[in-house]
Image (cartoon, helix red, strand yellow):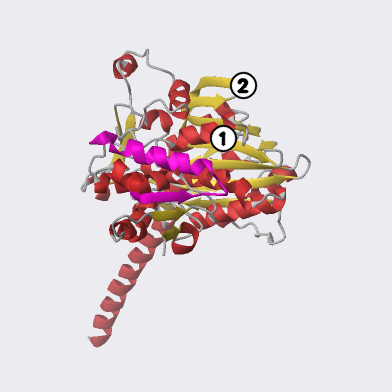
Amino acid sequence: MKKLRNKLWMDRHAKKKHMHELKRSEKNRYIYIYEPYKKFEIYGTEGYYQSEKAKKRLIRKVSKESYDTLEAPENFSIFMNPEESLSFFSDIETRIEFGSPVYFDMKSIVQLSIDTIMYFLAILKRIKSSKSVVYSFKGSWPSNQKCRDLLDSSGFLKYVDSGRMKKDLSLLSEVIQIENGQKADNSIAKKVCDFAMSKLNLKRVEIKKLYVMIIELMTNTKHHAYNKARKNQFVLTDWYIFVRFINDNQALRFIFLDTGLGIPFTVKRKGFEPARELIGLGPNHVEYINSALKGEFRSRTGESYRGRGLPKIYSYFTNQYINNLTIISNHGYFAEDKKEDMNKRLRGTLFYWELSKES
Amino acid sequence: MKNKIKISESFSETLGGRYRTDGPFSGEEFREGILYPAFQSLKEGKKLLIDFDGTYGYPTSFLEEAFGGLVRIIGSSIEVLDKLEFKSDEEPSLIKEVIGYIKNAKRED
């Protein structure tokens, strides 16, 4: 009798164990997608919200084998090839929103730029911060050696989990690798200025404007992510900065990315602009950027003593302290020789400028 | 003895943004912690000298919140200008900029 009782117990226990292991192996084979945040857009501002019930609602599970492959364009640069590059990023975000695992195929890239790497990092961070979507993505490295070297020197590996071995970059003296933050960071701004002083042999008095510019851009990131927020809404606002010294022309190249809402969405509308926008005859985004740079009263807070940062930066450009200032924000592309709206949109604002010894 | 604040020594040589929430060494922090107490403790007929030299630079939002913010608290740009003196050998144009923030600070009232 005792033998029978033990056998029954063993059978029940073995069955339980088997079911538990089956569940676990099934769980490992699949990605579980919960209801994602819903996107909304009101008067040109956008955000996300999620109800409490939605947080627990499982939508589907996706086999880990069924990744969507997205191939990056050969010329992968937002400044040089904005439409194709931004289209690639837009595809990534769409797939992630639907919960599809993504495979980034970067093998065929022959031209790669830092602005693209930064924007890529910003998207990855946004995905990781999403509270409901259990994401999964993989990718391949570029076959082109120059592009691989650029990825290494940019500091990209600091921010991602990769099987790729991190090279010893302590001897890399020509760059400040991508730095990231959310508030104004005076230590990073100081580091950039000290780098500029040492590379261009400048005195501290000569880099004061550079320091001011960097702090203003960092501060703008935090302030101008303001929008008419609903409950449960989030807007991730980060800044990223990268600096490279170009020995040939004794100049420094700066790239700064702000992942807020972008200048056109955050500046205050004037006069009939809201009505014009509603009927599709509104100012282009590049016009809003131009207006904000010129200091035409655009502070979204309505306070006249605010909104001086961008005009100050623009004055450094018009007075030739910095060169080649280029700004991309939402659809607007603003540069000395090009001012137009793009079809694709950049979420946030990208700045590029150069500083040389002759400035 | 003259009342003096050398910002790079009394506060920081690397300054921040406008508000405390923007990060360390903000204009708000400087005004509340150093500028306003020094201004309030001035004796009759005395002036406060602000020395701008020795820093990495002055973000516009820092300056406006520090000095424009002082006017918004005191309530009078004339009173503030009467009691402050400025020194900026490294960047002379800064003085005109700060005076501009002080004069324009009252516009919102």
Taking depth in this image into account, of A73 and B30 the one nearest to the observer is: B30
**Which dot marks residue A295?**
none
Residue A353 to residue A240: above or below: above
What residue is shown at x 25% (from left), y 50% (from top)?
A: A56
Residue A188 vs A336, above or below: the answer is below
Q: Which residues are magenta?
A: B83-109
Mark 2 touching mark 1, by CB under 8 A? no
Q: Which residue is mark 1?
A: A316
Question: Which element is circle 1 on?
Answer: helix
* Visible residue check, residue A140: no
N-term mark: 2 or 1: 1
- In the image, A199 versus A40, the foreground residue is A199
Farthest front residue? Answer: B45
The chain containing the residue under callout 2 comes to A
Q: Report crowding for label 1: few under 14, some 14 to 19, many 20 or more residues within 10 A (C-alpha).
A: some
- Left or right placement of residue B88 versus residue B19 in this view: right
Cα separation, mark 2 vs mark 1, equals: 17 Å
> Percent position (x, y) of residue A132?
33, 49
Where is residue B25 shown, x and y percent of the image? 42, 57
Quadrant of the image containing the C terminus of chain A: top right
Residue B76 pos. (x, y %): 26, 43
Q: Quadrant of residue A295?
A: top left
Residue under disc 2 on the same chain as residue under disc 1: yes
The circle drawn on residue A337 is 2
Tell me: B11 left or right of A87: left
Q: Residue furthest right?
A: A248
